[in-house]
Amino acid sequence: MAKAYVVKQQKPKSDQRKQAFKENSLFFLKSLISNDTCVEARKKPWYAAVIIALFSILIAMIVVVYSAFTTTGATFLNTPLYNLDNSLVDFDQTLVTKNLSLTVSDKLMSITGGSASWEAAFPTTTTLKQSNPNNAYVHEFTQTVIIDPRTTSSAATSSSSSVSSSVPTEPYKTDKVVVDLAVYWAGSTAIDDYYSTFVWKRAGDFPTATSKTNIIVLNETGFAAYKLPTSNTAQASKIQGKWDSSWVNDPTRVFDLKSLATTSSHGVTYTGSTAADLSNNTIAAWKEIFADGYETTKVKSAWISTGIYFGVYAGLTLILGLTVFLMTRGKTNPFRIYTFWECQKIAYWAGLSPALLGLFGFLAPSYAPLIFIFLYGMRVMWMSMKSLRPVYNS
């Protein structure tokens, strides 16, 4: 009797592709939370691991790149201002009083007006209660402070009976002169050279070892502004820009620092004539100037940051793959059969979920670069201790 054969019907190729797609999709989703799945991913094609690694790096960079390209120079005038708002208003009003125009035109700043020159408007012989700066506009005011003699050192108080009885022994009020802004004109000299030569190195200028005076240095091609620098400590914040940045969108733009209370650097006429209106208008105009002037520097710095962080995250991915390889070495380690490239693929597959969690960096952009590094490192170390830990039979 002839033997009967049962012929199995193979599924159509389209059904096979659908089944494979479902299995791979499920495997991919499981790899986001399962370390064992990432270990099994060493058997997957190399290009899948490389694509996931690149995708993870790009996702991790989203917060960093977004923060770098959306930064604006206008934030320099965000709080704390250290009285920059009042002193900048007084600076512009002083330019009006002295009929001194600081005009930006054709990507350069020039000085014109009744005073003819910056030195004539702000001579070194200007009478100041606290200092005599190098041809600088200085905003000063008198502040009442309370002096308590009882807080002086014992060495200062332990004097002989010859000390005059007129020396106060109780807290008392006195006037103190405060200079909160000094503006310099560097002309054709580079700002950094002028700043180091005429600001830092002159004892009569600002800042000194003890003063904390806001500094603005202007020259023909750009500006630099510093919040509370001193000669021996770093400034609270700094911004440096170029006048040519203002012409990115409007090559015909012309503006005068003297007119900022009534006309913005973009040519918009302000309304309002009260003291508060003029103050608000001036600050708004200076924010525009800082934002426009910093634009070119910002874009350049943003691209540099993008390249740096891409290199850092790519290097981190390779190092963590090497970590997996080293953790599986050893003569008695059952996982030593994993090759270097397989260990790299394990680490590549493990990078996507830390990158996605790194998007929470939008809530704290200053810590965003560290979130991905920390989470990625923690996952690989946890994987090495749990999923890749040798288990020996008794």
Image (cartoon, rainbow, N blue to C red):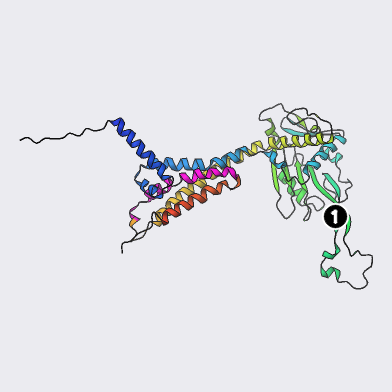
Q: State the residue at coordinates (89%, 55%).
A: 174
Q: Quadrant of the N terminus?
A: top left
Residue located 45% across and 52% down the image: 380
Q: Residue furthest top?
A: 252
* Residue that appears at 81% across and 42% down: 86
- Amino acid found under the numbered disc labelled 1: Val
Residue segment shown in magenta: 335-364
User: For this rendering, which residue is in front, 349 or 319?
Assistant: 349
**Residue 370, percent across and down?**
55, 49
Classified by dominant secondary structure, the portion drawn in magenta counts as helix
Q: Is residue 230 above or below residue 47?
A: below
Question: On the image, which quarter does residue 221 sit in?
Answer: top right
Q: Position of residue 51 (x, y in %)?
A: 43, 40
Image position of 62 (left or right of 256): left
In this view of the protein, can residue 135 be seen by the observer?
Answer: no
Residue at the extreme left of the image, as rendered:
1
Quick one: label 1, few (<14), some, or many (20+) residues within 10 Å? few
SS type, badge 1: strand
Q: In front here: 45 or 365? A: 365
**Numbered disc total:** 1
Q: Is residue 355 magenta?
A: yes
- Residue 71 can be seen, yes or no: yes
Q: Is residue 163 above or below residue 92?
A: below
* Residue 318 is inside the magenta segment: no
Q: Position of residue 27 (x, y in %)?
A: 38, 42
Residue on which the image places disc 1: 145
